Image (cartoon, rainbow, N blue to C red):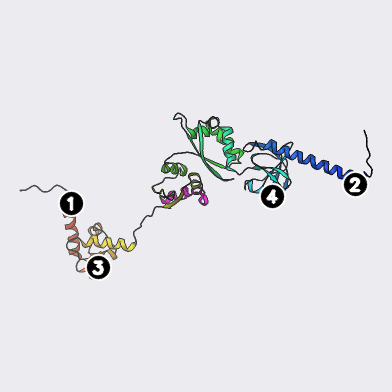
């Protein structure tokens, strides 16, 4: 039945339309909240619809969701119409009603991908003990199982690496390290820093700090590019990990000269002053004295007159050492 109230003109009709549309939109947004509040933690697929500054608006079909700049992966660029999979991080009450907040940088996104790909994780045969992630670059995942017959790392990698390849492809070639979890912190950190070879551990239980010593050639491998490997290991284990190179003490030139002088000075018949002169003129070893002749001593006035005695002392020292190493002469 048509009714035309008194004074119900164009402006009043417009106000009525706006009020009605406002109630409809409010009902739709409440429907979004009701439907998605139980889907937090799921992975959903949508299409990139438009950009709002650095935020991405994703079309989920009936609704739109927001992929904020803070939840984007720094190395990823999105195109209009591109299909993306995201993690439902939250449903928040924004200034314009409920908003579905998506994420691709959250570590739980990687955990969910593994749960979808690895059936052993879904049925609790394998347990994810920890994760550390730098989105777009590298992720470390610690896995463990109570079943001795199951290899947790091998199950996550899959036959010919197929399972982890599918996940890496979804993450746009982000590196994923799957590590065997161990209750012993020494073993756990060793697994996390593999294939780097660790030499020594200093464990501070009170401060949850570990100082590790590695050889010089293993330092860059253990620390990783820009310290990434060590940083992710600290996040994964919950311990502060400090990595130092092994200090190799190199003997100086002066120290080597002093040792050579001492080695010649202990030979009977050669004084310390003569040994010092011999070493500084290139005759640093007993073998050098045996191969020398008087012409080699002629350039050094202090040694020239003693050349014969020095060479005789060298030959006597060799004979004495030979006798000492060999069998003692039998008594007559």
Neighbor class of circle 2 (other Cα within 10 Å; few <14, some 14-19, many 20+) is few
Q: Nearer the viewer, mark 3 or mark 4?
A: 4
Q: What residue sits right under mark 2 in the picture?
A: 11
Neighbor class of circle 4 (other Cα within 10 Å; few <14, some 14-19, many 20+) is few
Q: What residue sits right under mark 3 in the picture?
A: 298
Q: In whole angstroms, how far apart are the C-alphas of marks 2 and 4?
A: 39 Å
Relative side of 260 to 59, left or right: left
Q: What residue sits right under mark 1 in the picture?
A: 322
Q: In whole angstroms, how far apart are the C-alphas of marks 1 and 3?
A: 29 Å
Q: Where in the figure is residue 193, as x and y percent of width and height?
A: 46, 44
Neighbor class of circle 1 (other Cα within 10 Å; few <14, some 14-19, many 20+) is few
Relative side of 40 to 197, left or right: right
Q: What residue sits right under mark 4 in the picture?
A: 54
Residue range corresponding to the magenta coloring: 215-232
Query: Nearest the camera: 193 or 11?
Result: 11
Q: Nearer the viewer, mark 2 or mark 4?
A: 2
Find numbered disc 4 in the image and state the secondary structure of the residue it sits on: loop
Q: Earlier in the sequence, mark 1 or mark 2?
A: 2
């Amino acid at each position: 039945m048509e009714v035309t109230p008194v004074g119900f003109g164009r402006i009043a009709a417009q106000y009525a339309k706006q009020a009605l549309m406002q109630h409809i939109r409010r009902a739709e947004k409440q429907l979004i909240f009701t439907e998605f509040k139980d889907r937090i933690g799921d992975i959903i697929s949508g299409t990139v619809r438009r950009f709002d500054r650095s935020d991405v608006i994703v079309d989920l079909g009936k609704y739109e969701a927001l992929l904020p700049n803070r939840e984007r992966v720094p190395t990823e660029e999105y195109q209009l119409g591109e299909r993306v999979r995201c993690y439902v991080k939250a449903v928040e009450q924004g200034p314009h009603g409920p908003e579905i907040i998506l994420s691709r940088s959250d570590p739980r996104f990687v955990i969910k991908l593994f749960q979808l790909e690895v059936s052993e994780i879904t049925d609790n045969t394998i347990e994810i003990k920890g994760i550390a992630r730098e989105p777009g670059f590298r992720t470390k995942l610690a896995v463990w199982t109570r079943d001795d017959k199951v290899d947790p790392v091998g199950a996550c990698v899959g036959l010919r690496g197929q399972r982890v390849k599918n996940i890496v492809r979804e993450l746009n070639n982000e590196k994923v390290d799957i590590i065997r979890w161990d209750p012993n912190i020494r073993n756990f950190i060793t697994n996390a820093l593999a294939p780097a070879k660790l030499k020594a551990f200093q464990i501070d239980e009170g401060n949850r700090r570990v100082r590790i010593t590695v050889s010089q050639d293993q330092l860059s491998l253990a620390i990783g590019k820009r310290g990434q490997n060590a940083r992710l290991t600290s996040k994964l284990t919950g311990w502060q990990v400090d990595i130092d190179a092994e200090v190799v003490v190199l003997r100086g030139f002066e120290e080597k000269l002093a040792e050579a002088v001492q080695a010649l000075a202990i030979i009977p018949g050669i004084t310390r002053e003569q040994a010092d002169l011999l070493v500084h003129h290139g005759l640093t070893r007993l073998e050098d004295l045996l191969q020398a002749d008087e012409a080699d001593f002629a350039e050094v006035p202090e040694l020239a007159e003693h050349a014969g005695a020095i060479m005789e002392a060298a030959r006597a020292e060799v004979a004495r050492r030979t006798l000492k190493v060999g069998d003692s002469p039998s008594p007559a």
